Amino acid sequence: MNFLSVSNLGKAYRTYRSEWQRFASWFAFPVRPIEEHWVVRHINFDIKPGEAVGIIGQNGAGKSTLLKLIAGTLKATEGKIQVNGRIAAILELGMGFNFELTGRQNVSHSAGLMGFSSQQINQVMPDIEAFAEIGEYFDEPMRTYSSGMQMRVAFAVATAYRPEILIIDEALSVGDTYFQHKSFGRIREFQEQGTTLLIVSHDRNAIQSLCGRAILLEKGNVIKDSNPEEVFDFYNAIIAEKENSTIEIKKIESGKNQTISGSGEAVVTEISLFNNRGEPIEIVGVGEHIELCIKVKVNQALETLVLGYSIKDRLGQVMYGTNTWLTEQVISCPQVGSVYAFRISFAANLGVGGYSVQTALVDRDTHLTANYEWRDLALVFDVINIDKAHFAGCMWNEPKISIEKLTE
């Protein structure tokens, strides 16, 4: 059974010649609007119990509208939404709050709208107050709150009882680092207990750490629905896409889909990994000194050429990244047809697991001004622990621990 099913969902905003025509349209009279703007249309997907799905896309893609439709705060123009379970939603910051009321009064009001009785609300009120951690402000009018304090109260009341479906729209981005960690901890607890999660965020790491699936919206339509790493790679390619650039997706030996985009003025022709003896390798020991060699060919006249690279873990989270703009090694006016070998030496202070290298050929410190080539999964390698003490995590950092007895 699916917890959430969205079928041919669409939302349009329409302009009519008169309010009478608008009124007639409510009762299905055949009145043609003079203007019609579809924010989302032909949206179809199913979400299973306990699944965590991220919704991503550029501003104006329809992400927030989609969540509002699912949460029931907007009425769909067409299509159907089937929900099996109780939804808790944190949408626009302050949505549903009365800023003349105190935090405590707003909690009572919001929880009542969520269907909880006075007895249930009184029972969890101490927990909500403790989780929000805003002190005496809990009994002050909400107009005195910062945006971070509003978010604390909104999240605390929305998660006071574990919902079957939790919907979050960028709200956590306004919180401080401490409360973000606290909130993500509660979200993970709910996931372990079976809560289905639907979250909108521009934070790639948040999506990839919480979600096993991502949906990419573009101009109100679903254009990709897959694992977060693949969807984010495609999303980055779209952002960097120019009029004369292309996006190519091909399956590599590991079975993953590799995304390559760019205008092609310069391209990576070869990428290899070597040990300190100059031998090509695919398996690296923790802390081993290695060299990444990237060969680049210049196909057209350029003013500047910059190489960027990053190392990503198996979930697509960036472990480290830099570029030759930041290291002040920009190539000016490279000759057409020339080939450059970029050799990058470093210690693989990484945790055990699979990693990939992403490359970007650009004109300066970002791929948004000129994207010659963006290549995901350009090289894949594994890190194993050969001679280091056992440790946990994604980074090797050999500590020196001292112990001193201070008292009897």
Image (cartoon, rainbow, N blue to C red):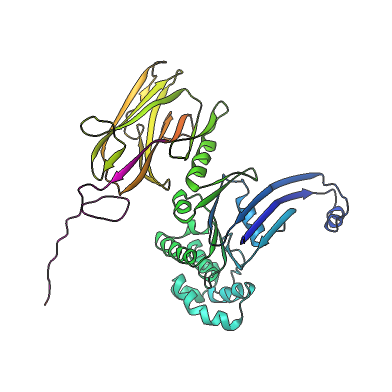
Q: Position of residue 166 (x, y in %)?
A: 56, 63
Q: Nearer the viewer, residue 384 or 342?
A: 384
In the image, residue 207 lies at what x, y percent? 48, 52
Q: Is residue 99 left or right of residue 8?
A: left
| Foreground of the two, 369 or 70 | 70
Read off the magenta span: 378-407
**Quadrant showing the C terminus:** bottom left
Which residue does the image show at 52% across and 72% down from the upper left?
160
Is 29 inside the magenta-drawn segment?
no
Q: Give how far across and how far down residue 407 sits, in percent.
A: 12, 75
Task: Please determine whether, in this image, residue 232 is positioned above or below residue 379.
Answer: below
Q: Main secondary structure of the magenta part?
A: loop
User: Residue 364 location in percent, x, y?
Assistant: 41, 31
Residue pictured at 65% horizontal, 45% vertical: 220
Q: Is residue 186 above or below residue 337?
A: below
Number of numbered markers: 0
178 in relation to 389, above or below = below
Q: Nearer the viewer, residue 94 or 359?
A: 359
Image quadrant for the N terminus? bottom right
Quarter-of-image position of residue 247 = top right
**Residue 145 appears in the picture as rendered:** no
Whether residue 384 is in magenta: the answer is yes
Q: Residue at x 73, y 49 (%)?
A: 12
Q: Nearer the viewer, residue 234 or 50?
A: 50
Specify whether 390 is left or right of 294.
Answer: left
Residue 211 in view (yes/no) = yes
Pick out the residue farthest to the bottom.
119
Picture layout, residue 100 above or below residue 314:
below
Task: Describe residue 195's horizontal placement relative to residue 181 as left or right.
Answer: right
